[in-house]
């Protein structure tokens, strides 16, 4: 029998959670209830708030006496983030559901994000129709808009809760019943792509798949890069084809598609065979033209579409990008190859195109050459544009070579 974890504030929203618990059990699943409220729950949970807080050496009773809600929420959230992955690893539940407003959602979301990708996870939330990035991050949490407040059972809330219940029960119960012919499991490779490097990644992807690999492509929009880094850290990835490192331009210059300061670290620190290039490092991304910071008024722009404006990286910015990528490559624990496309780093950085910049590219290449100190890094320079077939196939072949080399050495 499948078990669904239910976690939340069983004191302030005990009636609502009891409704969810009863309906899940009516549908043939068992429940594991975890109380993350500050005070006494309306019904007896399987795991109390005291147990949750003990995970991080906190005393919820002492905290409650101080009547400091923020302190209590912080302790409960940290405790839940510790206990939930452990319970799942121990086989105590198959999926999880919660509900909340901003406070409740903020409390349970970090713990759900700590669960592996593929574990069914649902939050019914009052904030589900807004910007949910702070809650979902790079995970696969499913958020369902509550329409009305999650406090109180009424005609609308019962409909929404019931739909969420049916969804979570369906996910955990039908997973084993779905008769899909399983393909032979293939080694996974992650690849980074942007519109202006798509031809390169598509060619390399086709080649790698023809050799028995499965390629997961991530769009370098900030979230895409962070998600790829997260997946690499799970240990499921055999090789990394990081063709497109453009997110560093946004991170360092202030564009809207930054992936954060840890981009390009996961593969290096986990010793995963990696082929890297500098795709689309000729551009910083902004929204509509009138949103570009005024200080950049005299720069070279390309209006990609009505909502996206690209700004050509200048010499100083290319130097910063080169230094940062070199810094990350210097962390590598296993052999890694950096490919430099000397004729252009993107579709619009080649002769006759709007971002053609030999001087800027030279600074980028020279910075990488002079700052990479790790003897595990090989630099391959090719007299090609990044989207040339020869460049793409060479990158793919090198990655396979690195993967095979690691197999022999293990």
Image: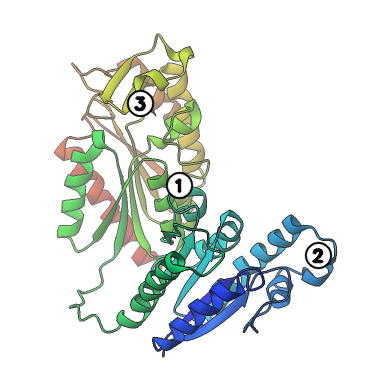
Q: Kindly identify which residue carries mark 3.
A: 283
Marker disc for residue 201: none
Q: Is residue 321 shown above or below 113?
A: above
Please report contact status of discs 2 and 1: CB closer than 8 Å, yes or no. Answer: no
Quarter of the picture holding the N terminus: bottom left
Q: Kindly identify which residue carries mark 1.
A: 130
Q: Nearer the viewer, residue 158 or 231?
A: 158
Extreme residue toward the top, this view: 298
Mark 1 crowdedness (10 Å alpha carbons): few <14, some 14-19, many ≥20? few
Q: Counting residues from the N terminus, which is met first, the one under dot 2 or under dot 1?
A: 2
Instruction: Determine the CA span between mark 3 and mark 2.
Output: 50 Å
User: Whole-percent x and y of residue 216?
Assistant: 29, 55
Q: Is residue 50 shown above or below 352?
A: below
Instruction: Determine the CA span between mark 1 and mark 3.
Output: 29 Å
Instruction: Determine the CA span between mark 2 and mark 1.
Output: 32 Å
Give the secondary structure at mark 3: strand
Q: Counting residues from the N terminus, which is met first, the one under dot 1 or under dot 3?
A: 1
Mark 3 crowdedness (10 Å alpha carbons): few <14, some 14-19, many ≥20? many
Marker disc for residue 63: 2
User: Whole-percent x and y of residue 231?
Assistant: 41, 58
Q: Quadrant of residue 343?
A: top left
Q: Nearer the viewer, mark 1 or mark 3?
A: 1
Q: Nearer the viewer, residue 57 or 282?
A: 57
């Amino acid at each position: 029998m499948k078990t669904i974890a239910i976690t939340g504030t069983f004191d302030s929203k005990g009636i609502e959670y009891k409704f969810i618990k009863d309906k899940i059990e009516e549908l043939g699943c068992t429940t594991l209830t975890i109380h993350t409220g500050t005070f006494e729950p309306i019904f007896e949970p399987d795991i109390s708030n005291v147990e949750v807080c003990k995970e991080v050496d906190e005393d919820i009773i002492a905290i409650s006496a101080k009547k400091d809600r923020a302190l209590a929420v912080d302790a409960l959230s940290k405790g839940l983030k510790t206990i939930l992955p452990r319970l799942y690893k121990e086989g105590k539940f198959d999926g999880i559901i919660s509900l909340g407003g901003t406070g409740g959602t903020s409390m349970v979301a970090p713990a759900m994000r700590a669960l592996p990708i593929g574990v069914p996870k649902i939050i019914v939330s009052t904030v589900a129709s807004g910007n949910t990035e702070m809650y979902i991050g790079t995970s696969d949490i499913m958020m369902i808009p509550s329409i009305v407040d999650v406090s109180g059972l009424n005609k609308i809330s019962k409909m929404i809760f019931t739909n969420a219940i049916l969804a979570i029960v369906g996910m955990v119960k039908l997973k084993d019943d779905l008769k899909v012919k399983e393909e032979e499991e293939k080694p996974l490779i992650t690849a980074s792509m942007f519109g202006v490097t798509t031809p390169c990644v598509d060619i390399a992807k086709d080649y790698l798949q023809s050799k028995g690999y499965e390629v997961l492509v991530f769009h370098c929009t900030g979230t895409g890069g962070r998600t790829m880094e997260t997946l690499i850290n799970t240990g499921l990835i055999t090789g990394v084809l990081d063709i497109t490192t453009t997110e560093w331009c946004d991170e360092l210059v202030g564009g809207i598609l930054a992936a954060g300061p840890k981009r390009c670290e996961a593969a290096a620190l986990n010793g995963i065979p990696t082929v890297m290039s500098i795709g689309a490092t000729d551009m910083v991304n902004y929204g509509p033209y009138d949103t570009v910071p005024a200080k950049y008024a005299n720069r070279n722009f390309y209006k990609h579409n009505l909502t996206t404006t690209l700004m050509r990286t200048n010499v100083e910015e290319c130097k910063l990008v080169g230094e940062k990528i070199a810094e990350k490559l210097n962390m590598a624990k296993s052999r890694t190859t950096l490919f430099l496309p000397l004729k252009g780093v993107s579709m619009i950085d080649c002769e006759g195109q709007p971002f053609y910049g030999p001087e800027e590219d030279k600074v980028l290449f020279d910075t990488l050459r002079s700052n990479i100190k790790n003897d595990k890094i090989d630099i391959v320079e090719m007299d090609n544009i990044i989207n040339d077939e020869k460049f793409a196939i060479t990158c793919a072949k090198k990655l396979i070579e690195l993967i095979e080399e690691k197999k022999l050495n293990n």
